[in-house]
Amino acid sequence: EKGYVTPLLATTFTAPGWDAVLTTGNKHQSGNWQPTLAVAEKRYGDGYFRISQIALAGRTPGHPVALLFARRLLGIASQ
């Protein structure tokens, strides 16, 4: 709709002790690139806490990767 590629996330994070679901990269304060988290999860009891910086709302119809990721998060098989 904008006519150019737009990112699916505005921020990234680090979370020691959390498991990466989706990683990306960002510059450290020193200016060097480092891996950071876009989505992470942590087991809690019988379930998980999940943190996601991915903005999927309204993005899946025209963005195949966003649609695939949303379907996988929801446990929906690809068609």
Image (tube, rainbow, N blue to C red):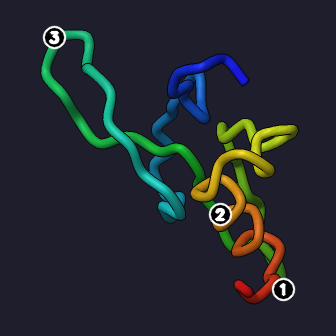
Whole-angstrom CA distance, mark 1 to mark 2, is 23 Å
State whether residue 45 is above or below residue 16.
Answer: below
Answer whether labels 1 and 3 touch (C-beta < 8 Å): no
At x 38%, y 43%, the residue is 24
**Mark 1: few/some/many CA within 10 Å (<14, 14-19, 20+):** few
- Asked whether disc 1 touches disc 2, contact meaning CB atoms under 8 Å apart, the reply is no
- Badge 1 is on which residue? 46
- Distance Cα–Cα, label 1 vs label 3: 40 Å
Q: Considering the numbered disc 3 on the image, is that residue within a helix, a strand or a loop?
A: loop
Instruction: Look at discs 3 and 2 and give the one toward the viewer.
Output: 2
> What's under tag 2, amino acid-wise?
Phe
How far across and how far down the image is residue 36, in percent?
Answer: 38, 40
Q: Where is residue 69 in the image (x, y as percent from the top left)?
A: 65, 63
Q: Is residue 38 left or right of residue 50?
A: left
Q: Which amino acid does label 3 sit on?
A: Ser
Mark 1 vs mark 3, foreground winner is 3
Q: Does dot 1 land on a helix, a strand or a loop?
A: loop
Distance between mark 3 and mark 2 Cα atoms: 32 Å
Q: Mark 3 points at which residue?
A: 30
Q: Earlier in the sequence, mark 1 or mark 3?
A: 3
- Callout 2: helix, strand or loop? helix
The three-letter amino acid code for the residue at tag 1 is: Asp
- Residue 47 spot, x, y in % from top left: 82, 78
Up/down of 57 relative to 23, above or below? above
User: Counting other residues with Cα less than 10 Å from the Cα at mark 3, is it few (<14), some (14-19), or many (20 or more)?
Assistant: few
Name the residue beneath numbered marker 2.
69
